Image: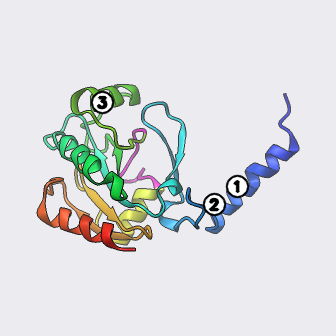
Amino acid sequence: MPVPATLIRLAASAGWLLASGLAQAADGGACPATLQYSFPRLQDEKPQALCQYAGKVLLVVNTASYCGFTPQYKGLEALYAKYKDRGLVVLGFPSNDFSQEPGANKQIADFCENTFGVKFPMFAKTSVSGGQTNAFYRLLAEKSGQRPLWNFHKYLLGRDGQVVASYSSLTTPEDRTLLKDIEKQLQAP
């Protein structure tokens, strides 16, 4: 069945808008360049534009199910539950870059939900470090000057989409500095 010409033109226009930096955020404002990426959701692999989180404070975390830091899921979910109504969104990106996330997306989703009750947005398994790093994580590493050296590395982005801070895996979700930084970003306009 041929694809209607109108549909092709719409797809081309959408691609041009994303490439030109004129994409719209969910609230109708312009989407920062940092968020002009789309990733499949972990649960059903449907594409999700990160622009929908424009204007929010974001904590971006690369995750793994078989890591000594895996219990951080509990703290990340607690952070999300505590601050989501004030504008914090935790974004999880499972990765097998450190050989501790071998499962398929469905297995990872079930593990996160059944073991830790994870409700924050999770995306399909992706590469966050090394030669196959996805473009979003390459940008985060470039802007912060730090790439993930292990699972549960964290990037904090302000409401404007700019990278505010980067935290090693050793920084727990309960860390005072992290909490202070999140509070500061939530209070910013």
Name which of mark 2 and mark 3 comes first in the sequence.
Answer: 2
| Left or right: 130, with 172 as reference point | right
Q: Secondary structure at mark 1?
A: helix
Q: Which mark, residue 14? A: 1
- The answer for how far apart the CA atoms under marks 2 and 3 are is 32 Å
Residue positioned 77% across, 50% down in the render? 10
Whether 156 is drawn above or below 39: the answer is below
Which kind of residue does numbered mark 2 sit on? Answer: Leu
Q: CA distance from mark 1 to mark 2?
A: 6 Å
Q: Which mark is residue 77?
A: none
Tag 3: residue type?
A: Glu
On the image, numbered disc 2 is attached to which residue? Answer: 18
Identify the magenta region: 124-134
Indicate the position of residue 36 as horizontal and vertical percent values. 54, 59
Which numbered circle lies on residue 113?
3
Label 2: element kind? helix
CB within 8 Å, label 1 to label 3: no
Give the residue drawn at x 68%, y 56%: 15
Residue 164: where, in percent of width, then height? 32, 71
